[in-house]
Amino acid sequence: MSALRGSARLFSRARPLLNRSLSTQTAAHVSRSLKPLILGSALVGYGVYKYMNTEQTVGLFPAVSAAGVPESQPSVYSQGKNHALYLWIYVKPEANAKEVAKAVAKLQKYVDQVTDPKMRDEEDEIWAGVGFGPNFYKQIGGKPKEDYNYPHRKGNLGEMPSSGGDVFIHAKCNTPSKLFELAQVVMKNMPANSVESFEDVYSFVYKNGRDLSGFIDGTENAADEESRQNIAVDKETGGSYVITQKWIHDLQVIDKEKDKTLESWVGRNRPDSTELSRKSITSHVARMTGGNSWQQAKPVEIVRQSMPFGSLSSEAGLFFIGYAASPMNFEFMLDRMVGARDDSNCDDIMRLSKNIKGTYWYFPGADELKKFT
């Protein structure tokens, strides 16, 4: 595993040079030849997946539509980057919602302003998307196919507060300063006196794709682009429903507990993320799959793009973000975490982390978004 990561990192560093020296056609051929890896029976986690599943040439955004499926926004099912921006915006009740939507619908223009399309490469390219909360989306004339209101949930091990929100921007880049600059440009271009409050969170890759708990994150993600698109995108609109949650880890618990205990809570081996053949019905894996059988069939899937964030002096944890073609995929998982579906068991992952914020968004397809400009 470590050897593969090392090779991937070397190629990632060398690729901008290769792309500059090769024709676009040749570079595209080289990029497409890098296919996702599957190790044993488990898909590789975020760390390897993000390095090995590179499908872009210099100056181009991800290929975000397959034949017959409307185009999605660049953030939806593209591979990960080293850093991400999560910009959570609350709009004043008296603000002109349509003017706000018009401003943020120009997100791609802001991305091009931060990184010149003619000059960008793998290190500074930005893949970004914008979504809207259910109430705000209705205010601007949006007509979602499904209800995506996010209810407050409570279980024996903790709560999942419903935090609401009007506009959310998810952006990915290997250069963190570019994400900070993008947030500046977005906020500068918001209509005057329209923002009530906002939070900008910046994440990072930790230990080649691990959560701060030490477990590999995103192990169950589909590795190939077509599968991720099938999971994340509504085939009729190109839109995607999104969950965002802010989790604060108890680093002292993680540091003091034995590996065996942490593994029993998660349902996976800590070093390599192998699923435990025998695990509790309250383990995270069992809650997400609907049972504690070995390699239990998953009733629902999502495309996870979560990453660690924070600092030791304040708070640190996981910014959880996932994309799906239907919000019902999230509902199943969250209900199972708080014992609100099938049984009363709660997710042991809540013994090491506390959820302090969460909601759902709808990321319109590319054509849908253009209507707001």
Image (cartoon, helix red, strand yellow):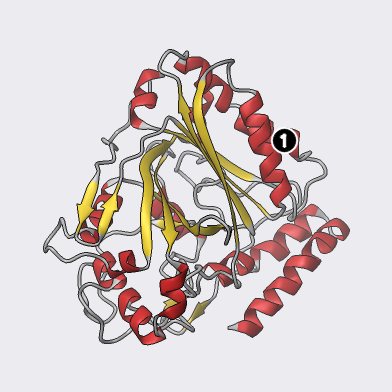
In this view, the residue in front, 196 or 27, is 196
Q: What quarter of the picture does the C terminus occupy?
A: top right
Total marks shown come to 1
Up the image or down, 105 lies above or below 66; here it is: above
In the rendered image, residue 227, in percent from the top left (x then y), is placed at 43, 59
In this view, the residue in front, 115 or 179, is 179
Residue at 53% of width from left, 67% of height from top?
Answer: 46
| Quarter-of-image position of residue 362 | top left
| Quarter-of-image position of residue 29 | bottom right
Q: Amino acid at mark 1?
A: Asp
Residue at 30% of width from left, 51% of height from top?
Answer: 330
In the rendered image, residue 303, in percent from the top left (x then y), is placed at 43, 56
- Could you tell me if residue 373 is visible in this image? no
Question: For this view, does 51 lie left or right of residue 139?
Answer: right
- Could you tell me if residue 13 is visible in this image? yes
Up the image or down, 20 lies above or below 187; here it is: below
Q: Residues within 10 Å of mark 1 (few under 14, many from 20)?
A: some
Determine which residue is flagged by label 1: 112
In the rendered image, residue 161, in percent from the top left (x then y), is placed at 30, 45
Residue at 41% of width from left, 69% of height from top?
Answer: 220
